[in-house]
């Protein structure tokens, strides 16, 4: 009983709080809605079980084991069709977690329907808490536990999303509190009280509040990698598509906003490129003039069109400064000033006299023009677009072509469309490739180097698909522009510099140039017609387009080239609105409050035991102090009872009357604390603890005097 001292219960609750707060590291890419209520409630329950178990036992392992059993018993009915944790139920839970892993690997941020992630989040939260709590409380290695608590925050250093600094500061404060509470040892009579560690934690929060905003953009925080650009600064897309450099500055500057009658745009393209020398893309010489932009539907092969575009996008440029207009990648009409012309070879809208900054214009598009059925039925190529088949000498055509042929053969792909899907599916497979914006390819054959490292960002993925398609005699080129951005209110969308993207476009006779998406889902989603099937190359049919399937507002009779986008359909959602799951978004915060409430309950339950713990620390500390300071022959075995220990002392040293009386009193105190039904029933003040230590010192002093008399 004179060994390890119990760690105060708030340490466990603080670690649970730090674990729950770590979810806020994903508030940018994932909608943290009501689906989190179950996982967080289970975390609170497990934490309460661990705290109560530690209050009644000194076992290091039992609280963790019971917490794990409670977690399993709660997770099974929460995420499976089973009510009790049987072997079959455990397998079903493992399957649910596996589905969550797959969903996380294939979903595109921001994930609005995150319900499939719930089993994965539940298991991750509980395991993280149990591991960190066991390391910190059972073994007092809170520093090591902090390394585990850091794990949920690491993806922000790799993937470009924002991290709320307030959440990070709160998690740090909780960990520091646990560190303070687990730093006691036998010579400390009482646990650190609130006045001992709250000021340190408060100081840490203040420092973090001042310094963290300054660190946005440094490794690990904000949108990474990124460059902060002032709100009025111009944003230019890097068109030197060198595979050894980043595509763009990844700024948070707002590039453009748009109002749409048909939802978010898939992409908005600026430029295309066909010439690739093995490591760099070259657009070549550009036309200085072309067809007037306001003359009709803009498409490289207008004879293929079967209907007039009907979905409207009213675009307002903010900081983008380019000589090309962002437009959709399907047939479209563009209403802009006469300064802009259409280049049908590149399928670009450009100007030789002005740029995009501050411009407002209208695009009326046909998002249903390209379908899976249309691409599957495309006729065979007859030598079209031969310039988009060239492969530069540095490229290892034999190796890359062999990989492409193996892929399409294994997929049973026979048509150009099926072959494209097979290549896209392979490149998007998270088991094969890793999305990483920090790569720096150095060779002349960057595609071969990418296939060796299996790590890269959109430029590498898109270029690899272009080259692989060309080895199969499919014309392919590069498209450069922006993803569709995020909704800022119903029908209104915002595109930032960090949405810059590159993708491959393959040529299909009877349709034209068609965009595909080989970049993993962590950055971009594939168009509906290119989603295909998970099990093979056969496409998943998409609804046949019809003019009545969606609203088709007519274009303005005389649209103004500088007209401002229409007003929002409705005001922005107010704080506290329901999430897409129909549950108020405030519920995750309520669930976190459950953890705090559980801590209060544990405090109330454990209050009656506080005096016993304090007394035990005082008497046991004095008892250990006595044993350590006696001569070696007078030290009793740790298995001895207090009475046996006192007899052993008297048998080996001579005690003065005062020392003998002090030994009797100290022995009775230890006996009462160890073996009385309820231990000490009165709170033992600090002065009493010091008095017991004085008794131990009196025994040692009295023994010495007796020995020298």
Image (cartoon, rainbow, N blue to C red):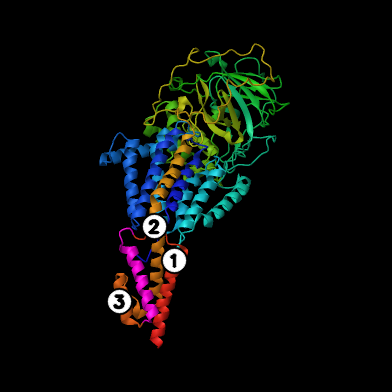
Query: Mark 1: which secondary structure?
Result: helix
Q: Closest to the observer: 279 or 487?
A: 487
Mark 2 or mark 1: whose residue is earlier in sequence: 2
Mark 2 or mark 3: whose residue is earlier in sequence: 2
Query: Mark 2: which secondary structure?
Result: helix
For disc 3, the marked residue is 647
* Left or right for 471, reference 339: left
Expressed as whole percent of the image width and height from the top left, the position of residue 671 reads 32, 67
Q: Residues within 10 Å of mark 2 (few under 14, many from 20)?
A: many
Labels 2 and 1 touching (C-beta < 8 A): no
Residue 214 appears in the rendering: yes
For disc 1, the marked residue is 688
Give the overall secondary structure of the magenta segment. Answer: helix
Expressed as whole percent of the image width and height from the top left, the position of residue 450 reads 50, 43
Q: Nearer the viewer, mark 2 or mark 1?
A: 1
The numbered disc on residue 266 is: none
Instruction: Please identify the quarter of the rendering in which residue 699 is found.
Output: bottom left
Q: Closest to the observer: 170 or 94?
A: 170
Mark 1 or mark 3: whose residue is earlier in sequence: 3
Q: Nearer the viewer, mark 2 or mark 3?
A: 3
Instruction: Please identify the quarter of the rendering in which residue 408 is found.
Output: top left
Count of marks, rendered view: 3
């Amino acid at each position: 009983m004179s060994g390890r001292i119990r760690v105060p219960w708030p340490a466990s609750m603080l670690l649970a709080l730090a674990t729950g707060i770590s979810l806020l590291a994903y508030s940018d890419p994932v909608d943290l809605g009501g689906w989190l209520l179950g996982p967080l409630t289970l975390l609170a329950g497990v934490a309460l079980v661990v705290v109560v178990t530690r209050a009644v036992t000194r076992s290091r392992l039992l609280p963790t084991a019971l917490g794990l059993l409670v977690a399993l018993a709660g997770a099974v009915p929460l995420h499976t069709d089973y009510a009790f944790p049987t072997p079959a139920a455990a397998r079903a839970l493992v399957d649910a977690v596996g589905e969550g892993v797959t969903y996380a690997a294939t979903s595109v941020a921001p994930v609005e329907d995150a319900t499939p992630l719930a089993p994965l989040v539940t298991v991750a939260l509980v395991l993280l808490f149990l591991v960190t709590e066991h390391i910190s409380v059972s073994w007092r290695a809170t520093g090591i536990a902090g390394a585990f608590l850091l794990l949920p925050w690491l993806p922000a250093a790799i993937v470009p999303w924002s991290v709320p600094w307030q959440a990070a500061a709160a998690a740090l404060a909780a960990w520091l509190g646990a560190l303070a509470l687990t730093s006691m040892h036998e010579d400390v009579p009482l646990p650190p009280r609130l006045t001992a560690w709250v000021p340190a934690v408060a100081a840490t929060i203040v420092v973090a509040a001042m310094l963290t905003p300054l660190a946005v953009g440094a490794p690990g925080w904000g949108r990474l990698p990124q460059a902060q650009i002032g709100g009025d600064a111009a944003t230019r897309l890097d068109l030197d598509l060198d595979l050894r450099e980043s595509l763009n500055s990844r700024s948070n500057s707002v590039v453009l906003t748009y109002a749409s009658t048909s939802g978010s745009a898939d992409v908005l393209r600026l430029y295309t490129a066909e010439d690739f020398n093995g490591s760099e893309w070259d657009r070549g010489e550009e036309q200085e003039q072309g067809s007037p932009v306001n003359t009709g539907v803009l498409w490289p092969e207008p004879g293929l069109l079967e209907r007039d575009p009907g979905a409207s996008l009213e675009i307002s440029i903010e900081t983008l400064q380019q000589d090309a207009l962002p437009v959709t990648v399907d047939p479209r009409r563009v209403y802009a000033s006469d300064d802009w012309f259409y280049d049908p070879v590149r399928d670009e809208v450009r100007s030789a006299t002005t740029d995009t900054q501050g411009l407002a214009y209208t695009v009326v598009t046909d998002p249903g023009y390209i379908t899976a059925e249309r691409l599957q039925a495309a006729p065979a190529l007859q030598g079209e677009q031969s310039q988009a088949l060239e492969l530069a000498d540095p490229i290892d055509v034999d190796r890359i072509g062999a990989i492409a042929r193996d892929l399409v053969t294994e997929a049973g792909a026979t048509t150009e469309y099926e072959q494209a899907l097979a290549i896209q599916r392979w490149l998007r497979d998270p088991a094969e490739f890793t999305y990483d914006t920090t790569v720096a390819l150095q060779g002349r054959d960057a595609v071969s180097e990418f296939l060796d490292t299996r790590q890269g960002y959109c430029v590498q993925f898109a270029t690899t698909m272009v080259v692989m398609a060309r080895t199969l005699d499919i014309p392919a080129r590069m498209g450069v522009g922006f993803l569709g951005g995020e909704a800022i209110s119903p029908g209104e969308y915002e595109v930032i510099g960090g949405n810059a993207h590159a993708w491959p476009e393959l040529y299909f006779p009877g349709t034209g140039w068609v965009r595909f998406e080989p970049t993993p889902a962590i950055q971009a989603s594939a168009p509906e017609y290119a989603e295909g099937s998970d099990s093979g190359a056969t496409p998943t049919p998409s609804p046949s387009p019809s003019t009545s399937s969606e609203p088709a507002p007519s274009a303005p009779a005389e649209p103004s080239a500088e007209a401002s986008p229409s007003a929002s359909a409705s005001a922005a959602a107010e704080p506290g609105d329901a999430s897409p799951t129909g549950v108020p978004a405030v519920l995750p915060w309520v669930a976190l409050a459950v953890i705090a409430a559980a801590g209060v309950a544990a405090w109330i339950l454990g209050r009656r035991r506080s005096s016993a713990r304090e007394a035990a620390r005082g008497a046991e500390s004095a008892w250990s102090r006595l044993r350590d300071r006696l001569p070696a022959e007078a030290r009793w075995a740790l298995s001895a009872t207090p009475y046996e220990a006192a007899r052993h002392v008297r048998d080996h040293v001579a005690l003065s009357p005062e020392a003998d009386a002090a030994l009797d009193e100290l022995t009775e105190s230890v006996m009462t604390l160890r073996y009385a039904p309820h231990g000490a029933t009165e709170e033992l003040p600090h002065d009493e603890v010091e008095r017991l230590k004085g008794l131990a010192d009196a025994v040692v002093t009295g023994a010495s005097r007796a020995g020298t008399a």
